[in-house]
Amino acid sequence: MRRMWVVAGLLCAGVARAQSADGMFASGAVGAVLDAFHAAAASANEEKYFSLFTPDAVFLGTDPTERWTRDEFRKWAHPHFANGKGWTYKATARWISFSPDRRVAWFDETLQNASLGTCRGSGVLILQPDGSWKIAQYNLSIPIPNGLTDEIVGRIAAGAAPKEKK
C-alpha cells in the first residue's frame, strides 16, 4: 500500500511540474518574469520593469502607432513612473509554449485592467546566457468581440472618434 502512495505521489508531482513549466497558469521561470513585469508596472518600478526586457525588445501597445523599442517605450513611460503612476494588469489566465531547445518561450495571457477591462498580452521571451529569461516582444491588445467587429472596423476605416458616454 505504501508503494502505491509513493507511485501516486510521484505521478502527481510529474503532472504538477508539467503544468508549472508549460500551459495555463504557468508558474515556472517564464511565468515569474511575466508576474514580475506586471508587478513592476503596478508599483511604477521603472528600473525593474525595463530590466525584464532584452536590449532590442519591442513593445506593441493598443494603438496602431504604438510600436516602440525598449528605449523608446522607456522614454514614453518615464514621466509616468517618475510620478509614481504605473498601470495595473492582472493576469487571469496564461499559456506558455517553448521551442524544442527550451531557449525561446512564447505566451499569451488574459489580463484584467480597471479602465480597459479584458485585455490580452502576448509575446516572446528569450533565455539569456546567464540563465534568466527576458522579454523580447510584448504585445498588449484589446480583444474585440466578433459581434462588434463590423462596427469597430467601420469606425476605424471612417476615422471616427469613439462615441462619448452619456
Image (tube, helix red, strand yellow):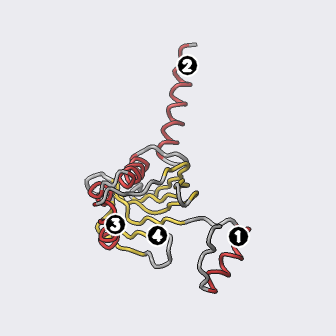
Name the element at disc 1.
helix
Left or right: residue 152 compared with residue 93: right
Q: CA distance from mark 4 to mark 1?
A: 21 Å
Q: Which amino acid type corresponds to the residue marked 1 in the rendered image?
A: Leu
In the image, what residue type sits under mark 4? Gly
Residue 159 at what x, y percent from top left? 59, 85
Tag shown at residue 99: none
Q: CA distance from mark 3 to mark 4?
A: 12 Å
Q: Secondary structure at mark 2?
A: helix
Name the residue beneath numbered marker 4.
61
What amino acid is labelled 2 in the image?
Answer: Trp
As drawn, the residue found furthest toward the front would be: 166
Q: Quadrant of residue 127?
A: bottom left
Q: Residue furthest bottom?
A: 158
Q: Which residue is mark 2?
A: 5
The Cα atoms of the two marked residues, 3 and 2, are separated by 53 Å
| Contact between labelled residues 2 and 3, with CB atoms less than 8 Å apart | no
Q: Nearer the viewer, mark 3 or mark 2?
A: 3
For marks 3 and 1, the one nearer the N-term is 3
Look at the picture and state if 14 lies above or below 5: below
